[in-house]
């Protein structure tokens, strides 16, 4: 999985922004979502990302893991990532 | 701007609509730089907001060295999206070098052109360099209206340019400025854009500024014409849904500027001489790329929107909409 052709990512103090330049839509990301995009850029497999974030954020309750899973699905649904 | 590390975990990504709808406040750099690379143009359009035309290059346009220094800063700051416009950007002697630089550093670049230099070779080159899109101004669905609006322009040549883009596989956007004599063609123009293979169609109200100040009596659509114009566009949005994006600003300038006062866009307008404007529809300049870095100007840009002179200009506009005639008398903040 990688960012779609027309999607640009930039880190910011608050997290990051995704900019889909074809539709000119901008998505602002919190730190957890930013971490997901960083993993995508690093080439991590989609299925591995939630668990990696769970470990990194010491997410004992699993909230971030669920959030990451939902976010990846949302990225796919919006066409912001491609395989 | 709704960006915060404390955003609820269930809401990881907050969609804005466009760079213009994304506030600039918390961002480390602009999201979009709209760069008018020269004021020179092969055409002399009746409505040109920049008063561009043959021999109209500014005497102090950026040197090659300055141009590439700005581009380097832009890419270093990871500004994700740029557009080159003019004037006619393709008459700039270093146009293709500039395109190559931006695309080579993975920037997404849109070219806004009148389409008269889009021969097959240039289109192939734009494709191979990887531009995101080329936006062509087609203000009319017929030779008669287009040529009346685009003085020295040729409808057939512009159409041929768009066809060359399509043949080369370059994504196409079409831009349309309404006037009293072409507003009735809007439906046909949208259809034409789709037939030419465009993926986006943009339009909105024509501004009373630049050349339009002198030609307004021949240009200005009536409110009845605008009503019909937007009615047709609403229908076209539905007709082309999923095939071509029909995008238009129905909002008047005053409403838009009032909105911007509280939601400045994450967008810098760069003039051919390196001055940076807050927004095209205001006369205010917040920096000079010949003397300041892009980072410095980004800071000035955010403070400039709070300057009381900006709010006053917008409110004065409510009393006298014709103040837009003075947009080229720059006011330095």
Image: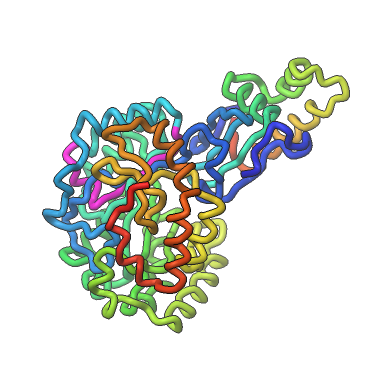
Q: Work out which quarter of the rendered image holds the C terminus of chain A and state it.
A: top right
**Extreme residue in the left direction:** B55
**Extreme residue in the right direction:** A61
| Residue A37 at x, y percent in the picture | 62, 27
Residue extent of the magenta highlight = B79-94
Q: Residue at x 28, y 69 (%)?
A: B212
Q: For the image shown, how many numbered marks are present on the structure?
A: 0
Q: Left or right: where does residue A76 sit relative to residue A58?
A: left
Query: Foreground residue, B110 or B170?
Result: B110
Residue B322 to residue B301: above or below? below
Q: Work out which quarter of the rendered image holds the N terminus of chain A and state it.
A: top right
Q: Residue at x 77, y 32 (%)?
A: A67
Q: Is residue B323 located in the magenta-colored stretch of the structure? A: no
Q: Left or right: where does residue B281 sit relative to residue A64?
A: left
| Residue B64 at x, y percent in the picture | 20, 32
| Residue B197 at x, y percent in the picture | 40, 55
**Displayed quadrant of residue B34:** top left
Residue A71 seen in the figure: yes
Residue B167 seen in the figure: no
**Displayed quadrant of residue B214:** bottom left
Residue B184 to residue B192: above or below? below
Chosen colour scheme: rainbow
| Residue B260 at x, y percent in the picture | 51, 55
Q: Residue at x 80, y 17 (%)?
A: A58
Q: Residue at x 66, y 24 (%)?
A: A35
**Extreme residue in the bottom direction:** B224
């Amino acid at each position: 999985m990688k960012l779609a052709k027309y999607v640009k990512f930039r880190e910011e103090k608050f997290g990051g922004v995704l900019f889909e330049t074809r539709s000119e839509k901008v998505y602002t990301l919190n730190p957890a979502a930013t971490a997901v995009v960083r993993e995508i850029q690093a080439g991590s497999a989609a299925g591995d990302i939630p668990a990696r974030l769970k470990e990194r954020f010491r997410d004992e309750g699993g909230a971030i893991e669920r959030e990451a899973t939902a976010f990846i699905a949302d990225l796919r649904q919006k066409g912001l990532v491609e395989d | 701007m709704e960006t915060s590390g404390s955003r609820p975990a269930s809401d990881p990504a907050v969609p804005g609509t466009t760079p213009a709808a994304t506030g600039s406040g918390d961002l480390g750099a602009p999201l979009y730089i709209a760069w008018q690379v020269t004021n020179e143009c092969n055409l002399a359009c009746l409505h040109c907001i920049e008063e561009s035309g043959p021999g109209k290059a500014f005497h102090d346009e950026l040197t090659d060295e300055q141009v590439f220094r700005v581009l380097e800063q832009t890419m270093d700051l990871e500004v994700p999206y740029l557009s080159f416009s003019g004037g006619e950007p393709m008459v700039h002697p270093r146009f293709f070098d500039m395109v190559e630089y931006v695309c080579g550093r993975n920037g997404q670049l849109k070219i806004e052109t009148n389409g008269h230099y889009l021969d097959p070779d240039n289109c192939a080159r734009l494709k191979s360099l990887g531009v995101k899109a080329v936006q062509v101004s087609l203000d009319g669905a017929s030779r008669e209206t287009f040529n009346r609006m685009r003085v020295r322009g040729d409808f057939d040549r512009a159409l041929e340019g768009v066809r060359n883009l399509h043949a080369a596989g370059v994504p196409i956007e079409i831009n349309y400025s309404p006037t009293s004599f072409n507003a009735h063609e809007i439906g046909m123009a949208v259809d034409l854009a789709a037939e030419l293979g465009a993926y986006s169609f943009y339009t909105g109200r024509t501004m009373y500024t630049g050349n339009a100040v002198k030609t307004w009596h021949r240009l200005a659509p009536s409110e009845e014409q605008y009503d019909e114009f937007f009615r047709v566009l609403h229908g076209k949005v539905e007709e082309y849904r999923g095939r071509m994006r029909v995008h238009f600003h129905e909002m008047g300038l005053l409403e838009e500027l009032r909105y911007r006062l509280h939601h400045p866009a994450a967008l810098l307008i760069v003039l051919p001489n390196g001055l940076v404007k807050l927004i095209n529809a205001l006369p205010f300049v917040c920096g000079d790329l010949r003397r300041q870095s892009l980072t410095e100007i980004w800071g000035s840009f955010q403070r400039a929107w709070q300057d009381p002179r900006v709010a006053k200009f917008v409110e004065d506009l409510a009393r006298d909409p014709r103040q837009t005639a003075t947009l080229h008398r720059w006011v330095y903040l």
